[in-house]
Image (spheres, helix red, strand yellow):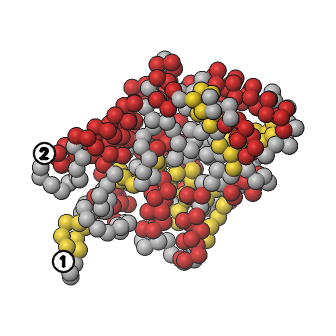
Amino acid sequence: MDITGIRKDFPELEQKVHNHKLIYFDNAATSLKPFPVIEAIEEYYSKYNSNVHRAGHKISSLATIAYENARKKVAKFINAESNDEIIFTRGTTESINFLTDILQDSILNNGDEVVLTVMEHHSNIVPWVELRNTLGIDLKIIDINDKGELDIDDFGKWFSEKTKVLSITHSSNVLGTINPLKKIIKEAKKRGVVTIVDGAQGIVHSKVDVQDIDCDFYCFSGHKIYGAMGIGVLYGKRALLEVLPPYQQGGGMIEKVSFDNVVYSSVPYKFEAGTPNVGGAIALRTAIDYIESTGLEQIIEYEKELLDYATQKLLDIEHLTIYGTAVNKDPIISFGIAGIHHYDLSTLLDGFGIAMRSGHHCAQPLMNRLEIDGTSRISFSFYNTFEEIDYFTDKIKIVKKMLI
C-alpha cells in the first residue's frame, strides 16, 4: 500500500499538537475520517438533505436511494443473506440495548441464563446487568487465561440447560484478543442458544462473514470503521427479526395506524422508528468503499506488521508489562510501566503530540480480573507508520527518566 498517499487522505494527520506533528494511536476508540467520507457528508447536507421513504419529491427520492444503497453496501460487506437483515442504529451500544430490550419480551424469562465473558466492553455488560435486576435472569461469566484467551476446550463450563443467550465480543478492546467465534457459536447452536456478537473492534481488522460465523446478531459502530459518529449497524437473521417485536414506535415503521390498532412495516423498517441518520449511513457506505478500494486484506496484513513491530519495541523497555499476549490479536496493545501511572504517561506523551488512551477502557470487570486499575493503550490503523512507533517508544523512555 501507498502509506504516504493514504495519510494524505486523512486531514487530521496534517495538524500539529503542542507544536508536534500529531501521532494518532487512539484508533480503538474512534478512527480518523478520510476526505471521501467527509465530502460524502457535506454533499448530502448541501445537495439532497431530506427525509427518506416519505416524500415524493426529487431530493427525497435521491436521499432514499442513497440510504438504501448504504444498506446494500453493508449487507454485501458482511455477507448478509439479505439487505433486509441490516438495521441502522446509533452504534454498537444502541444495538445491544435494542437486543436486551426486545429479547426480554420474546425469548428471555426469569431464571434464564445469559453467557458473557470477562473481557466484554461495558456496552455488552451494563444492559445485561440491568436485565438481571429487572427480569431476574442469571449471568454466567467466562474467564480468560494468562494470555488473555478464552478457554474453549470445555464448553460444558459455558452452557447449561438454562442458557438462552450468548453475547460475546469479536475482539477485546483492551487485550486485542480475537475470539474464535465460529467454533464458539457452533457449540452454542448445538444447544439452541441465541448468539450475539459485539463487533465494534472486529469489523475494523477482520473480514467479517456473518453467514460463515453463523451468529444470530452482529453489531458494530460506523465511527470505528472510518465513518461518521452516530451511525451503527445491527445485523440479524431474518427469521428472528420477523418474529421479534419492534424496539421503538413512531413514524416510518408502520403500515397502518388507528386508535384501535397498529400494523407495523416489514423488516427492517419496523425497527427504524423516526428520522434516521441518513448522512451517517451514506458516510458509512463511503467508508466501506474506501476500505475496499484500499484493499482489506492488505490493510489487515499491514496492521499486523505494525502490531508485531510495536510489541517488540515495547518489550525492550524495562519494567513494561503488556496485557494480552494472545496468538491472534487485533492491533491493540495495553501496557503498564512499573512506577508510572497510566494517566501521567498519557498526559506527558500528549505533550509530544501523541494521542493515546489511558484508563479502564470501559472494561472495569476485566481490569479487576487483571488486578490493575487501568492501562495505557495504543491501537493502530493503516495510516500509522513504523516511524511513529519509533518516535513513540523513544518518548516513553524520556518520560520514564522524568518520572522514575
Which residue, given by chain and number where applicable, does mark 2 sit on? Answer: 58
Left or right of 137 in this view: 321: right
Seen from the viewer's position, the closer of residues 63 and 350 is 350
Say which residue appears at 47% left-offset and 48% top-offset. 220
Residue 333 image position (x, y, % from top left): 68, 38
* Residue furthest out toward the front: 19
| Mark nearer the viewer, 2 or 1 | 2
Q: Nearest the camera: 345 or 142? A: 345
Q: Residue at x 31, y 55 (%)?
A: 276
| Residues at marks 2 and 1, CA–CA distance in whole angstroms | 30 Å
Circle 1 residue: 258
Residue type at mark 2: give it.
Lys
Earlier residue among tags 2 and 1: 2
Above or below residue 231? Residue 308 is above
Residue 155 is tagged as none
Left or right: residue 368 versus residue 198 is: right
Residue at image position (42%, 68%) is: 102
Question: Quadrant location of residue 101?
Answer: bottom left
Q: Residues within 10 Å of mark 1 (few under 14, many from 20)?
A: few
Residue type pointed to by label 1: Ser
What secondary structure is found at the residue carrying circle 2?
helix
Q: Please say if 118 is above or below 61.
A: below
What is the x, y in percent for residue 89?
39, 55
Assign a secondary structure to mark 1.
loop
Tag 2: Cα neighbours inside 10 Å, few (<14), some, or many (≥20)? few
Q: Name, please, the residue furthest toward the right.
A: 404
Is residue 354 visible in the rendered structure shown here? yes
Residue at coordinates 64% horizontally, 64% vertically from top-left? 140
